[in-house]
Image: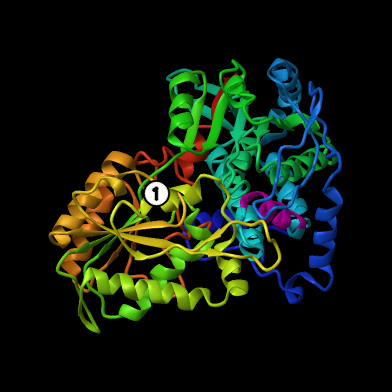
Amino acid sequence: MINIDEAVDAIRIRDHFSAFAESPSPRVYGEGAAEAGRAAFDQLLGGDFDISTPGAGDRVSPEVSPYGLTLGVAYPRVARDDVDALVSAAIAGRRAWREAGPRRRTEVCVAILEALHSRVFELAHAVQHTSGQAFVMAFQAGGTHALDRGLEAVAYALAAQEFHPATATWTKPGRKQDLVLDKTFTPVGRGLALLIGCNTFPTWNSYPGLFASLATGNPVIIKPHPHAVLPLAITAQVCQQVLAEQGFDPHLVTLAVERDGDGLAKELAVHEAVRLIDYTGGNEFGDWLVDNARQAIVFAEQAGVNAVVLDSTDDFTGMINNLAFSLVLYSGQMCTTSQNLFIPAAGIETDQGQLSPAEVGTALGRAIDELLGPDEKAVELLGAIVNDRIPTLVELSRSYGEVLVESRALTHPAFDDAVIRTPSLIMVDEESTAYEQECFGPITFLVTTESTSASIHQFVRTVGEHGAMTAGVHSTSEEVVDAMREAALDVGVALSENLTGGVYVNQSAAFSDFHGTGANAAANAAYTDLAYVANRFHVVQSRR
């Protein structure tokens, strides 16, 4: 059983805390748990998904796995003409949910998280076959780590709502008689929340917003990416089941599935009842939301240009192996993967001597090959390419500069139709413009500069203009590390310093690391801090 007070303590202490075991081992989850989860996933394929979606007319089956499997799951489709009926159903139970109060809402949210955890293997297969993540990563990032992020949001929501007392007696001394008022302070959700899911991390990027909104009293409409519906459909189904079991309107969480090109997100986003929007995706639609959904607060995570400044190291092998893993993981299809590695043209000082940019690139390519090993092992780190445009972008990137590490196509031993690509490394100079925009996928630039100071300058310039979710530095000089730390503070990006072991720049730990800062163009909020939840409710008082 989850102890929510321990979770609240964890967000204040910032040490390691996790409520959900990340290893899919039978020693942890019991014999047969993995097989039962796979069977449950298989049972969903080719059938009608069981969920209540008021106003929906026909059904739609929009998903094909990046591994080539046609899921064939049919969901109730919400057309643009169905939006008012869906919205009316979503807000019908809002009063009872508000009156339940923060602690009761927290109990229900925790029960939802525990119910989702009981289906974590099924959920992991759903994430794998919609996002292209390898299974273990899908189990962790899409399952247990996503659940931790959801619990973290609930903990913040409870702490924020209980910051003020629920009731108070106000006494002002008077000459003849004291003035006495009894006061009540009620957290009231802003209104209907719209969650717009993404293709690459359908649960990890969605659970913070989902649970932050729900725990603060807001009904939620989940609008998944058309190619990654199943993980969020399972999530919505579990939410409805638990809400009903706990005596609340199940339509406090609803699922809105569309066909490609339906434009449902735009229709929902500007609806007058929608007051909160959580979005992860490209800049074009994120900017549209901010400009057009004026009645709502938009929490948006968008594109950025993550960077690492290479200056020097006393553990070259550790540095290279750490960078190699961070680039290989999920073929770079993470919003936190480093795209730009800045390095002086004269090279860097290491425990193996002065090494040129080309030598660093060669070592990185060798480390990638050693890490990947044979194809059957490599695919468990790389996963599958989720977007059809990425192979084209990889080929196009070869023309941007000198190719130090070629991207290779691999064959998946279990899925013949999966598109698998290893990382590429392209060397360009700082005058190039290629590295100034997000090149999503297995594309990394080794950017040569005049000096480390110039590298930090280019880091500040590119992140200041385009944003970033992560940054890194490798240096044996305290002066360089301090300069990079100041630069990261100036442009508002999380910094990792001299990582050479088992922690990587593109990973973040719930309850300790903030994902994003809200201080640059890549994201206007952080997963999760008090600002992320406190703006989802008002405190309304009464006095007598």
Q: Give the tally of numbered discs.
A: 1
Task: Judge from the rendering whether residue 292 lies leftward or rightward of residue 253; answer left or right.
Answer: left
Residues shaded magenta: 122-131
Residue behind mark 1? 396
Which residue is at 73% across, 31% downward?
252
Q: Can residue 278 be seen in this view?
A: yes
Which residue is at 72% across, 24% downward?
95
Q: Is residue 127 magenta?
A: yes
Q: Where does residue 536 sit, x and y in percent of width and height?
A: 54, 32
Task: Judge from the rendering whether residue 313 lies leftward or rightward of residue 242; answer left or right.
Answer: left
Q: Where does residue 97 sit, x and y in percent of width and height?
A: 72, 31
Give the SS element for disc 1. helix
Q: In the picture, residue 137 is in which quadrant? A: bottom right
Q: In the picture, residue 213 is in which quadrant? A: top right
| Tag 1: amino acid | Leu
Residue 287 in the image: above or below residue 353: above
Task: Judge from the rendering whether residue 109 lies leftward or rightward of residue 9; answer left or right.
Answer: right
